Image: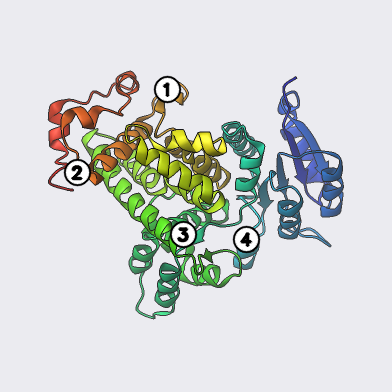
Amino acid sequence: MTHKPHILFVDDEKNILLGLKRGMRSNRHAWNMSFASSGGEALEIFKEHHVDIIVSDMRMPIMDGAQLLERVRKISPDTARVVLSGYAKDEVILKVIGPAHQYLAKPCDFDDLEETIKRILRLRNCIGETLVRKLITGKKNLPSLPEIYQDLLAELENPMSTNRSIAHILEKDIGLKAQVFKVCNSAFFGLPQKVNNLETAVSMIGLGTLRSMTLLNGFFTTLKNQVSDCLVLERLSNNSLEMALMAARLAKKLGLSKPEIDLAISAGSLCHIGTLIVSATWPHEFEEAVKQCEQNPDQTIDCFEREQIGADHGVIGAYLLGLWGFPLNLCEAVAYHHRPHLADGGKHRVLCTLHMAQHFSKMVGRAIFDEVSLMRGIDVNFLKEQDIQITTEFLESLNLKENA
């Protein structure tokens, strides 16, 4: 029997709950749905049912949405947490960015809410291991490098700092960068489209709010006295920069549109989010996967990650980014950049770009530039299905050796 996901809606206004019941009625055969008028009532439902997604109002008496979602995070870490609120104040976003995965603004179009829920459910299905999914869903933040975090604090206190100078520091740390994008692209800011440029994200958030975020206990965390972990994170952050640069070069060569190029760059800079989670959550398994990969250079590390923990860094990173509201095509590119053939039918130009970028970046890192090696590891059949053909002339035009 197929498991029907359970969605819980919480709002202290009965008219809004009735509206949600009517608006979500078309999904009643696909979802189990519960409706609660208070935080206490919602917690009682958790005693009786496993809840896959909770959508809660922010302003409620006795227990507000942020308090409720933090309780849910602790008692049911596998539950995806969404805030639905019309209360737009800086202090509110600072309260919910920790316990909530996404922030949706009232009034929220039912189609947008339905699409958000379906996107989260779709990405949850990519990770069959419940324990793995629970550990990812329960996270409030990602670890950051202590040195970069201190640089960010200092620059935010510098009266001469600019959006560009702040973005330059954030670009060096994959965890800080991902969380800034998460906040900027929440409905709190009401932007008509997703922001993929880090300097623009800093500008939209504002230095004041960003300063408050850095000082907020629990929003950003740093690695302390863990030299090996810091080295792993530093390497991942550097690799992310290289991936973003390679993705930009490939996207332009492939003739992608400006929005697609920006998306490919973002996907490149965030594609190691999953590796960060794997290394921090399963350090021994990660170390073993790295060792096996070094002993089998023709195979990619995701194969050994699946053997060790039951999921690879691609789907793990994509799931977290999906929870945080990143665009679905970016999440798919991150999820399948090693195995693009697993993507659903349709056009996947950003995925193609990221798939090539991860392989070519690895080859450049190993100083391997012959055509046979460059093509070994590329899913040529998938690229052909996407009307992309890698020729000798195309490879030469990338100037990989000169840019190494």
Q: At which x and y percent is residue 306? A: 51, 34
Q: Three-letter amino acid code at disc 4?
A: Ala
Find out whether the residues at labels 4 and 2 contact each other: C-beta distance under 8 Å: no
Q: How busy is the neighbourhood of tag 2: few (under 14 within 10 Å), some, or many (20 plus)?
A: few
Q: Amino acid at mark 3?
A: Asp
Report the residue marked by disc 4.
88
Q: CA distance from mark 4 to mark 3?
A: 38 Å
Visible in this render: residue 59? yes
Q: Earlier in the sequence, mark 2 or mark 1?
A: 1
Say whether residue 22 is left or right of residue 378: right
What is the three-letter code of the residue carrying label 1?
A: Gly
- Tag 2's secondary structure? loop
Q: Compare residues 314 and 205 and report the one nearer the observer.
A: 314
Question: Quick check: can you spot residue 332?
Answer: no
Q: Nearer the viewer, mark 3 or mark 1?
A: 3
> In the image, which disc is placed on residue 278?
none
Q: Which of pointers 2 and 3 lies earlier in the amino acid sequence?
A: 3
User: Disc 1 designates what residue?
Assistant: 346
Q: Left of 383 or right of it: where is 337?
A: right
Q: Is residue 145 left or right of residue 16?
A: left
Which residue is nearer to you in this view: 312 or 332?
Answer: 312
Residue with the mark numbered 3:
229
- Element at label 4: loop
The reply to whether callout 3 and callout 1 are in contact (CB within 8 Å) is no
Q: Position of residue 137 (x, y in %)?
A: 63, 46
- Residue beneath the point at 29% across and 49% down: 242
**Residue 102 point in image, percent of width and height:** 60, 49
Near mark 4 (Cα within 10 A), the count class, few <14, some 14-19 or many ≥20, is some
Reading the image, the residue beneath label 2 is 367
Dot 1, crowdedness within 10 Å: few (<14), some or many (≥20)?
Answer: few
Residue in front for this viewpoint, 47 or 374: 374
Q: Earlier in the sequence, mark 4 or mark 2?
A: 4
